[in-house]
Every structure is written in C-alpha cells, then in structure tokens.
Image (cartoon, rainbow, N blue to C red):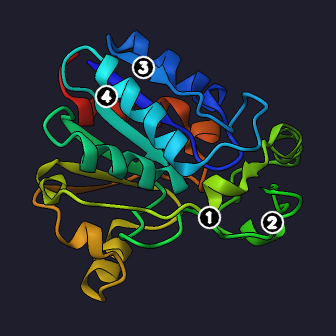
Amino acid sequence: MDILLIAGLWLDGSAWAGVAAALRSRGHRPVPLNLPGQGDGSTSATLDDQVAAVLAAVDAASGRPVVVGHSAAATLAWLAADARPDKISKVVLIGGFPAADGRPYADFFELRDGVMPFPGWDPFEGPDSVDLDEQARRAFAAAAIPVPQGVATGTVRLTDNRRFDVPVVVVCPEFTPAQVKEWISAGDLPELAQVEHLDLVDIDSGHWPTHTRPAELARLLAAAAGPA
C-alpha cells in the first residue's frame, strides 16, 4: 500500500525518516513528500503549488493511496480528498484538523520578510512539546524551514462533498479522542462533523510523534492502511 506522508509546518519529507523505515519493514511503501517551499529553497511557493504537488503524488501512486497529513498539513490531506475522492482510500490526520472552505491555511504566527519562521518553543510549551528534550528542541529549531507567506495565508477551497465519503482516521497526540468528540459536538470541527466514516486513535506523545514515537506512529498508520 502506498502511504503518502505530508509533514506539517517548518518540516520537509525528512521528518518522516523513522516512520518511513518502520512502515517499509511492515511491507508498505511510504512516500514522504517534499513540497514547494518546504526544503527546495523557494519562498514564493503558494498553497496552490503545494496542493498541486500532493495531487501529483496521488496520481502517481500505485492503486488508491492513504494520504497522511501532520498538524497543519491535515488540511493539505483533506484538500487532496476533495480533489481526488475516488482515488484515495483513506485520509489520516495526525495532531491536526482540516480548515473549512474559505479559511486561511495556516496564518498562525507572525510573518517576516515574506515568510512565517518557526516562532520558538514558547507557543508550544506544555503538552505539545512535553516529550521533546532540549537537544531535540535545538535540532528542530535549527532545521526549521520558514513557511512561505503564499502558503501560510493561502485560502482553502473545498468544492466536492464526496470528500465526506473518504474514510478518515484522526491520530490524537497531545489531545484525546474524547476531546475531539467534544470539539465536533461543539461545532468547532465542521469538516470532521460531516465525515461518514471517522475513527479516532490515541498515541501517547506530544505534537510531534514523527520525532518522538516513530515506531508507534508507524504501527498506527499501518493499521489504518490495512494489509500491505
């Protein structure tokens, strides 16, 4: 099974190294994506450019792939389901939720000189970063790739309601499945509220299980994908 892996903000495909190795050992074909503006040196990339890169990977995949989005890239995975509802077998969202139609993609932090740099660890103190030691934090910050403004402030456009027929698994790291259910009931996650087949699974980690729990995360992704 092809499993397309989309990293969140400030990360490129190398963030999936440990997860990808564990998935290969389970017989799957992981495909970590390097998106425009995330590792290619471009600061002019747009959200549309990143969506196009994800869709190209979907179209090139063998069979109907699983599309995995971490953090903000949950929205990219969901945009792929919107554009290719018949070509994707499942969407897995790790520590993030799809933005609704008409919302900005990820305008979460200050923009400087046309990019959104990593803001440091203060905004992520607590459950998000509890399992990252100082060495891991320094390494993450040193490698962080500023997000182009055209990506961060791009407008999400969702057009095909068949996306709600694509099964979705939410992997819950710094929050719990019970909290997700509460947020759906409160109307805070309108896209997930309409998904026909939604599963919630827990993982004991902070926001970046890609870094701190790669083997466990790979096990959950393999289970979501089904037999290799």
Dot placed on the residue nearer the N-terminal end, 1 or 2: 2
Dot placed on the residue nearer the N-terminal end, 2 or 3: 3
Q: Say which element carries label 3.
A: strand
Q: Which residue is mark 3?
A: 30
C-alpha distance separating marks 1 and 4: 33 Å
- Residue type pointed to by label 2: Leu
Q: Which residue is mark 1?
A: 153
Which of the two discs, 1 and 4, sits closer to the camera?
1
C-alpha distance separating marks 1 and 3: 29 Å
CB under 8 Å between callouts 1 and 2? yes
The residue closer to the viewer here, 224 or 34, is: 34
Q: Which residue is mark 2?
A: 111
Dot placed on the residue nearer the N-terminal end, 4 or 2: 2
Residue at image point 62% right, 53% down: 151
Place residue 18 in its image quadrant: top right
Place residue 116 in its image quadrant: bottom right
Dot placed on the residue nearer the N-terminal end, 1 or 3: 3
Image location of residue 49, percent across then percent down: 54, 40
- Residue type pointed to by label 1: Thr
Image quarter (top left, top right, bottom left or bottom right) of the C terminus: top left
Which of the two discs, 2 and 3, sits closer to the camera?
2
Q: Say which element carries label 2.
A: loop
Q: Which residue is mark 4?
A: 222
Which of the two discs, 4 and 2, sits closer to the camera?
2
Which numbered tag is attached to residue 131? Answer: none
Image location of residue 19, percent across then percent down: 51, 27
C-alpha distance separating marks 1 and 2: 10 Å
